[in-house]
Image: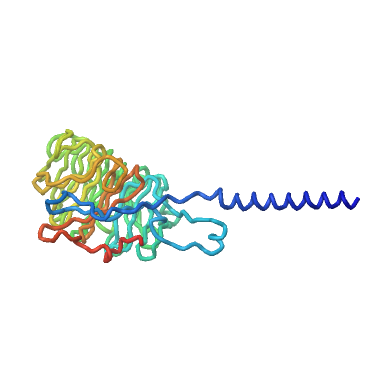
Amino acid sequence: MSRSTNGIQRRCVWLVTGLLLVAVAGLTGCVTKPPKVREEPKNLVWPMPPEQPRIRYIKSYRGQMDFKRRDSFKDTLLGIQHQGIHLSKPYGVAVNSDGSRMYVTDAKLRGVVIFDMEKKQVSMLKTDAMGGLASPVEVRVDSKERIYVTDSFGGKLMVYKPNGETLRSIGGADGMKRPTGLALDEARNRIYISDVVSHQIMVYDFDGNFIKRFAQRGSAPGDLNFPNNLAVDKDGKIYVTDSGNFRVQIFSPEGEYLSSFGQLGDGFGAFARPKGIAIDSDNHVYVLDAAFGNYQIFNTKGQLLLFVGAVGRGPGMFWLPAGMYIDKNDRVYVVDSLNKRVQVFQYIKEDESESPAVPEAALKLDGD
């Protein structure tokens, strides 16, 4: 009887030990491993030496694991690593006035992802019940930190306070159908929105009042065919990627046609799928092309100056790039959609040396 009891006890000990091992393995084995953060290249520039660089690659951002952080002692003991929020299907990008926050729209996450460079945190913009987004496309931030997001399927432009509280919804009765591109001109109290279905540009003031719409579908100068993205230069001129006509069109602040450049083709200066557009402090025009996997840089006359990138997954390469943005320090933000990241570059002015225009240590966009 005693021998039998001892045998049962031994079997129980082995059973309990086995269950504990399975439990520990479950805690450590079922955790999703975070994506590996690759080492960034130190001196990736365009054009290549011996020519003076004009564009310098800085860094790529995918999500929380781009920032170094310490897990709790308990999590470390159990082998748990926090993956956090990561981009899934990004399209638009913008930063606030001091560059401390980067905002990225994500269609799959159905919201706006915030990269807080000071806190080294990635989070979703927490909106209220009125502020839900069906299909966020473009995002912009004004000088008061208010956040503007075009909701394509929702047929509206949402405006949020910095904390995500809904300030207003623009559209509806004005006939907005599928808003995509977005540009803010605070100096002239104008908001410009491209409606890809109506083939028009809609104009509002910053109180949400409808002012006018301009353009119609067609291929003549001033006509639009599936307009995608927008940019406004320091003089208030409006630049539109007229995707169905494979060109960029330029309008006055009042919507009068001024000029255009580009045509369908696979050579330098031509377009296949023009998307994001932005303008640097020297009035150079940057145009993303989703088919070419690059962005081309033009002067205001439409003359090609430089192109950056190719189709691929490495730094400075793109796979279906979408939106782009240039901040006041001439940092160029490119949404690399299928690579699920935002790549950041620096425009280097002609009178600057070959050293970085802004030392990386001084950039707020620093994940270390």
The residue depicted at 30 percent of the width and 48 percent of the height is 335
Quarter of the figure with the C terminus: bottom left
Residue closer to the observer: 241 or 284: 284
Count of marks, rendered view? 0
Residue 1, image x, y percentages: 91, 50
Q: Is residue 314 left or right of residue 256?
A: right
Residue closer to the observer: 219 or 304: 304
Where is residue 262, by image quadrant? top left
Where is residue 245, by image quadrant? top left
The residue depicted at 18 percent of the width and 59 percent of the height is 188
Q: Is residue 199 visible?
A: no
Residue 179, image x, y percentages: 30, 45
Q: How is the image coloured?
A: rainbow
Residue 28, image x, y percentages: 56, 52
Residue closer to the observer: 89 or 175: 89
Q: Is residue 82 left or right of residue 199?
A: right
The residue depicted at 18 percent of the width and 34 percent of the height is 266
Residue 329, image x, y percentages: 21, 61
Residue closer to the observer: 122 or 148: 122
Q: Is residue 149 visible?
A: yes
